[in-house]
Amino acid sequence: MSAPIEAPAATAPSAPSSSSVNAPLQPPTAMQANLTALYTIVRREVHRILRIWGQTLVPPAITMSLYFLIFGNLIGSRIGQMGGFSYMDFIVPGLVMMSVIQSAYGNISSSFFGAKFGRHVEELLVSPMPNWVILIGYVSGAVLRGLMVGAIVLVVAMFFTTVRIPHPLVTISSLLLAAVVFSLAGFVNAVYAKKFDDIAIIPTFVLTPLTYLGGVFYAVEALPPFAQTLTLANPIVYMVSAFRHGLLGSSGIHLGISYAVMLGFTAALTWLALHLLRKGVGLRS
């Protein structure tokens, strides 16, 4: 008889090393924490925009469609050419820019003031989150809404005329800078506002007149000399001019001057917004 085969002896599982058990979790770096905070604010803003899309995205499209129909088709056919282009082609850049400016400004002013009114902006201020993260987060949300509205209006314009983009880099950069400038301006408005009526004063009595007098419906060079001088004090003129150069290939104001004005306003309003956050003006009770 052959000897019985013995089963191999079971080996006890090896105990995990003390280094793997006791190794502490590495805390996130300051940059990782700031990026997480920034992503959270931007995600909340985008979710807010998309959740109430019927209020944030649809109304500008309807309003601009009426502008294209009335000013472009009905009135424009009697005006003829403006600035060397058909009137419909001429007003497309101005109407797109107008929708972007109004949407970006309105988004951040209502959103940040709502956070201030609900008192949860104080939680952001006492957290380790830097002020620049708070500012960039809210501005990014407003810029995204402005660009989404601008894209929608540009698509609507395609139903009325042929949209060409001979200078895409100028088109995108001018639209982006204009959205940033008025997002920062809306932020400053929201900081100083004490009630909901205060965030409607600037758009009604300042922003709307500046927009309509900003070369949206007319060429600046067609005005009398004294009116041209007054018009050139309006920053929206330079934004519309740069965007018109991107869409039509020419504009009445030198492109370098337009970018200098937009970058100057961006720098000044960024400094002002960060200063207000640092001092807690109108934010801390």
Image (cartoon, rainbow, N blue to C red):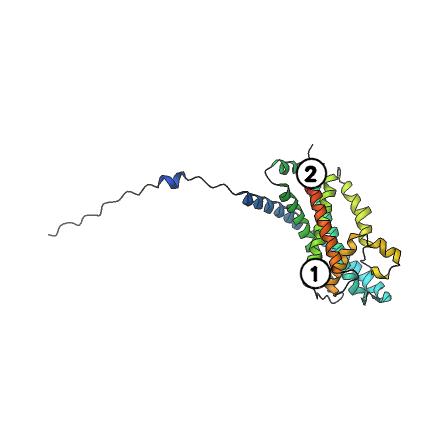
Specify whether residue 260 is in view: yes
Please count the marks in the image. 2
Quarter-wise, where is residue 99 in the image? bottom right
x, y percent for residue 255: 74, 60
Q: Quadrant of the C terminus?
A: top right
The label number, if any, that marks residue 116 in the structure image: 2
Tell which of 225 and 175 is nearer to you. Answer: 225
Query: As drawn, is 21 to the left or to the right of 213?
Result: left
Marks 2 and 1, how far apart at CA: 36 Å
Residue annotated with mark 1: 170
For badge 1, the amino acid type reads: Val
Residue drawn at the location 66% of the way across and 44% of the way down: 135
x, y percent for residue 91: 79, 61
Specify whether residue 62 is in view: no
Residue drawn at the location 75% of the way across and 51% of the way down: 102
Mark 2 Cα shell of 10 Å, populated few (<14), some (14-19), many (≥20): some
For badge 2, the amino acid type reads: Lys
Quarter-wise, where is residue 190 in the image? top right
Q: Nearer the viewer, mark 2 or mark 1?
A: 1
x, y percent for residue 138: 66, 46
The label number, if any, that marks residue 51 in the structure image: none
Q: Is residue 61 above or below residue 268?
A: below
Disc 1 is placed on an element classified as: helix
Mark 1 Cα shell of 10 Å, populated few (<14), some (14-19), many (≥20): many
